Amino acid sequence: MNGPRPAWVRVLAWLGVAAVLLATLALYQRPDFLIQLADQVWSCF
């Protein structure tokens, strides 16, 4: 089970990483989300 992974598994993993990064970038385009997130983090202290 420790052998090399098939190419499609690696491609699928990279596509998942790219999707998460794009979703994060999309959230940064919404200032109201950033303010809400900062307020939630600040309320922990």
Image: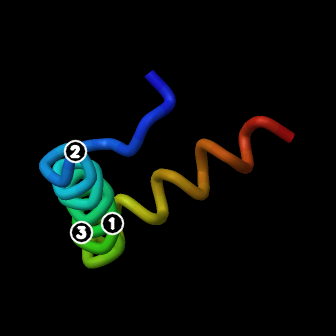
* Furthest residue toward bottom: 29
Instruction: Say which element carries label 2.
Output: loop
Residue tagged 2: 6
On the picture, is 3 further left or further right than 15?
right
Q: Amino acid at mark 2?
A: Pro
Q: Amino acid at mark 1?
A: Leu
Q: Amino acid at mark 3?
A: Leu
Residue occupying the point 23% across, 69% down: 22
Kindly indicate whether the residue at mark 3 contacts the one at mark 1 (C-beta within 8 angstroms).
yes
Q: How much space separates mark 1 and mark 3, taking CA atoms?
A: 4 Å
Instruction: Say which element carries label 1.
Output: helix
On the picture, is 35 further left or further right than 4?
right
- Label 3 crowd bin: few (<14), some (14–19), many (20+), radius 10 Å: few
Question: Where is residue 3, by image quadrant?
Answer: top left
Numbered tag placed on residue 22 in the rendering: 3
Q: How much space separates mark 1 and mark 2, taking CA atoms?
A: 23 Å
State whether residue 29 is above or below residue 39: below
Question: Where is residue 25, by image quadrant?
Answer: bottom left
- x and y percentages locating residue 8 in the rendered image: 13, 49
